[in-house]
Each structure stands twice: as C-alpha cells, then as structure tokens.
Amino acid sequence: MTNIATKNKMALRPMGKSGIDASAIGLGTWAMGGWMWGGGDDQASVDAIKASLDAGVSLIDTAPAYGFGHAEELVGKAIKGRRDEVVLATKCGLVWHEKKGNHFFDAEGHAVHRYLGKNAIIHEAEQSLKRLGTDYIDLYITHWQDSTTPIAETMEALLTLKQQGKIRAIGISNASPADLEQYIAAGQLDAIQECYSMLDRGIEKTLLPLCKQHDVATLSYSSLALGLLAGKIGPERMFEGDDQRKDNPRFSVENRVKIQGFVKSIGGIANDHGISIAQTVIAWTLAQPGITYALCGARNVKQATENAHAGTIQLAGDEVSLIFQAITSHLTGFDDA
Ligand SMILES: NC(=O)c1ccc[n+]([C@@H]2O[C@H](COP(=O)([O-])OP(=O)(O)OC[C@H]3O[C@@H](n4cnc5c(N)ncnc54)[C@H](OP(=O)(O)O)[C@@H]3O)[C@@H](O)[C@H]2O)c1
C-alpha cells in the first residue's frame, strides 16, 4: 500500500488578513502542561514539539493556563534556535495574578479568573514572552471571554501590543457570534479557536459562516475529541490522576464501543491511503469548509509525527461523503448514550 502521507508536502494556509501562512496541522500543547491530563513527561513533550517542526508543522498552540506556565516553558525550550520555523500562538484572559473579572475555577493553588482588562493583557503578554523565550507572538488569542470588560478595551490592548511588534495577529476563543462581531467592529480579527471535531460540529451553523464572511481563519481545537477519535482508546484503557477523561461521560465504555464501530467503518478509506484512523479523522477535519487549521494534541514523537503527516493527505470528495455516512450511522446521539 502506498503511503501518500510521505509523498505530499504539508499544506500551508493563510491566517485571515494577517499575511501569515501556517501549517494546516497545529500542534496543541495542553496535555504537555500536565494539569487536567494526569501529568506529562517533559522530555517526551520537548521531543514531540521538535518532531512536529521536523515534519513540517509550523503552527504551535499553547497558553499560560496549560500547566500554569509549564507548557509555555516547554515550548520555549523546544523552539530555541528554531524560532523562524514557528507560527507561535498563545493566549491571554485566564489570570491568577489578580482577582478581577469573573471567577472561573480554582486549581493548583490558583484562583483563576476570566479577565481581559487592558493592563492585565499587557502584563500577561510580557510573562508569556519570557516563558517562551521570544520577543514576539505570532497569534495572540483571548482564551475565554470576559463579560466584565468592554471588548473595545480588550482590543485596544491587543492593538497596542501589535503596534509594539509584540504580537502579529489577533485571535479569540470560546466566543459567541456576538463577541466576534464586536471584535471585528473594534479592529482586525484574524482567527478564532473553537472546539470542533466529528463529535462537536456546533460552529458549522454559527461562527463558521461569519468567519467566511469576514475572512477570519479558524483553528479547530480538540480535533481528536481529547484522543477518543484517534481510534486507540479501547474499553480497557484507564485514565490516571487528574486526567479529565476519567470522569467524562463521553469516555464511557458504551461510547468507546461505538467508536470502535466507527473506526471499522472508515478502516477501508484509511487502508486505501495507507494511513491511520487518527490521520483519516484529522484529514476529514481539514476537508471541512471553513476549518483552516486542525489543532491536535500530542504527548510524544510518535503521536506528533503521525498527526503532522495528516496535513499532507487529501481525501477525495466521495471519501468525505462516506465518512459523513459513518458519522451519521455510528456517532449520532453519541453523548446521549
Ligand atoms: N482554546 C481553548 O479553550 C482550547 C481548549 C482545548 C484545546 N485547545 C488547544 O487545542 C489543542 C488540541 O486539543 P486537545 O489537546 O484538547 O485534544 P485532542 O487533540 O483532541 O487530543 C489530544 C490527545 O489525544 C491523544 N492523541 C493525540 N494524537 C494521537 C495519536 N496520533 N494516536 C493516539 N492518541 C493520540 C493524546 O492523549 P493520550 O495519549 O493521553 O490518549 C493527546 O494528548 C490543545 O492541545 C490546545 O492547544 C484549546
């Protein structure tokens, strides 16, 4: 079987109106932070980031909240000497250095608030730059929205950072269509980052048409549904420590069995391309209209390399349709189980 993944080049896609091109696959670093994922292996994480770059991934997504600075530090370590190969995305708006905005959650001894006031954003950007070991961030994203601060004030802070050359493009995450419209009214918005996968398609009818209308790029997050869609989590897999999947009803044994049925039904397409189920799922995600980049988390070199190669795969139109049929047959009402 020919593996077309090794024949083609990583797809590059434009990031809205920013003038930045980034790889269609983005490496996500949430799990590398350890927190909410049962801990992490720092050396494996650094190696995974380097392996992603080696495989043609330029887009790396991180956030201060991922391990409370830890994931950013690991990214900084991994990209040292390779900054020009990276389109670096990080975030602001989940703060624990002050108690303003809305209290969101308590974790690891921190009271975390959603806050996007001007001074806090400027402070957070400086902290991220230090941890990342760089003097600019390519895409700076408001991580969660803050109902206590006018969006015009938030955008003013982001535009100030842009004028200073500390950020190159502006993005938002976990935002409503009304938020998106307000950001666009206040300045240039280049990207959104939202949950999207075969199991989470809500934005198809809400945010995606707006992004198309305004030339805003889309980064799908949890593209593998926290690993469930990678096709390797069987009924026997146990989740340890604070791994968020331990008590998540989506990971019930019934659902894992459903996923196995889905995996079987798309196995022929994967075989025809000589690729894995995870690669087929990611390639399907990238084939969806309005999805510019698929962010995929990886814990080690093997996962990072496998996911990166999905950015070289082009599914045919009839394959995308067949996968839709499999989603309808096996994954409809999935979370009602
Ligand atoms: N803006 C936001 O609010 C937000 C929210 C969530 C995520 N994100 C971003 O999006 C990124 C991606 O989402 P995610 O990390 O939540 O979930 P994901 O990409 O759906 O799943 C990642 C997990 O799936 C497993 N996995 C990944 N590739 C695999 C492969 N090839 N084979 C087998 N298992 C594989 C790994 O976990 P195991 O090996 O432990 O199974 C990995 O940690 C994040 O890292 C983060 O950068 C942003």
Image: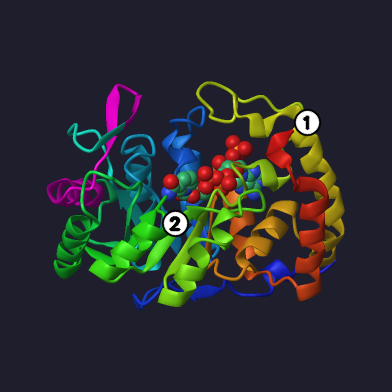
Which residues make up the magenta segment? Answer: 104-130
Confirm whether the magenta stretch covers residue 117.
Answer: yes
The N terminus - image quarter: bottom right
The CA span between labels 2 and 1 is 30 Å
Q: Which residue is mark 2?
A: 193
Question: 69 and 95: which one is in front?
Answer: 95
Q: Which residue is mark 1?
A: 254
- Kind of residue indicated by mark 1: Glu
Occupied quadrant, residue 273? bottom right
- 246 to the left or right of 271: left
Identify the residue at image location x=39%, y=49%: 62
Mark 2: secondary structure: strand
- 269 to the left or right of 32: right
Across and down, in percent, residue 157 comes to 17, 58
The C terminus - image quarter: top right
Across and down, in percent, residue 219 comes to 48, 60
- Kind of residue indicated by mark 2: Gln
In the rendered structure, find residue 292 and report the number of the disc placed on it: none
Distance from mark 2 CB to nearest ligand 1 atom below 8 Å: yes
Whichever of labels 2 and 1 marks the residue nearer the N terminus, that label is 2
Is the residue 291 above or below the residue 227 in the image? below
Question: 146 and 243: which one is in front?
Answer: 146
Identify the residue at image location x=51%, y=65%: 208
Indicate the quadrant of ligand 1 in the picture: top right
Across and down, in percent, residue 63 comes to 35, 46
